[in-house]
Amino acid sequence: MNTYTKTLLLSAFFLLCSGLIAPVWSQDGVATSQGLKAVPGTITQITPFINYSETYQWSDLPEVLGEDASFDWAADLLFAREIWCLEFSFKKPRLIEVDFPNEAGRLERKLVWYMVYSVTNTGKCLSREIETPADTKVQVLVKKEPGKLEVKEYDQIFNNVEGTYRPKWVDYNGQPAGEDGSVPGSVRFVPQFVLVSPAVQNPVEYAKDEGGLVVPNPVATEQVKYYDEYLPLAFVKIAAQEDPQQSFQTTVTIASVDIKPGETVWGIATWLDVDRETGIAKSLDPRIDRFSIYVSGLTNAQKWENAPEAYTPGAELLSGRNVSRKVLKLNFYRPGDEFDQKSKEIYFGQPGELDYQWIYL
């Protein structure tokens, strides 16, 4: 290898490492394996996470106990369910300029934030199995007083049978469809994407301190929420830019798709700052430098607490329960300035924070 060739190779290597030129992904690479062309940015995959404790919850039936406290069979019941969780993949949020008609009927250019994502049904759910003694009747745990349980035997089968519980994985992959055409293990993704900025920079206020020095007053930062919006004009432009051959769903249409085991569906979430009262839309605050995206609908895991008012006589059925649902929180960092907003200045993760979390809200 001569000196000229070595120089070219070293120059190319330097440019690649410095980010001045981008690598070309092969058709089998990460960036194209799900049908997307190799535009700048990689696809990040979030592995489904299910905790065994999410498959059950002990709870009273406060509507029954509120009517008659002697109905001890309605205390400390075991509510069990099969939990599924979709695999979520995404590209970091990007910005695109789109012309929208304003109140005067003229086109006005706005900056739309969007995120390309996919959801995959792995076909695997977490359930539980129970081993009960073969020579006993059905037994029910009844709460007699705080911290103490008593076992009673009933001829009727209750949902909190005494026994040994173990986690059990259920795999729906490869199971035949039913007579009605439904595929076992199919789920629907009914999403909501909420972009939350806890670090909107308010104008700095200055005042004199006790020594006469002019110092900035601490101004509390506000938390602003932007809900994903169905924007047909932006959706068409984004889909054509990302991959015109790929079938994308909106956050509205994807809710009607039965995602079968092993199936992947692609979608696009878009954000504008829309006034709910007037319907007037504007671009997101350009001063946003840290933000999180909360994705709901990826799992059916939930938990609840019974409020004291739920135990009052005559309480409405299912009222007085504080229900929390499991959502995915994605953290992002945008160190660029507010005057020259670019997609490449958005990074997955935040300094001092986890890249993502599963939380209950």
Image (cartoon, rainbow, N blue to C red):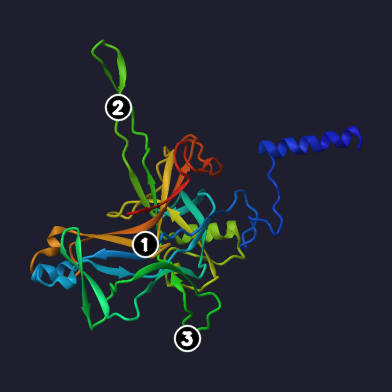
Position above or below: 152 against 51: below
Q: Residue at 53% of width from left, 55% of height from top?
A: 90
Name the residue carrying label 3. 178
In the image: residue 348, left or right of residue 104: right
Query: Residue drawn 13% across and 68% down?
Result: 65
First in sequence: mark 1 vs mark 2: 1
Q: Nearer the viewer, residue 91 or 360?
A: 360
The image quadrant where one finds the N terminus is: top right
Q: Is residue 99 visible?
A: yes
Which circle marks residue 218 in the picture? 2
Residue 118 locus on image (x, y percent): 52, 61
Residue ranking furthest to the front: 135
Residue depicted at 34% across the width and 45% down the height: 224
Marks 3 and 1, the one that precedes in the sequence = 1
Residue 73, by quadrant, is bottom left
Tag 2: residue type?
Pro
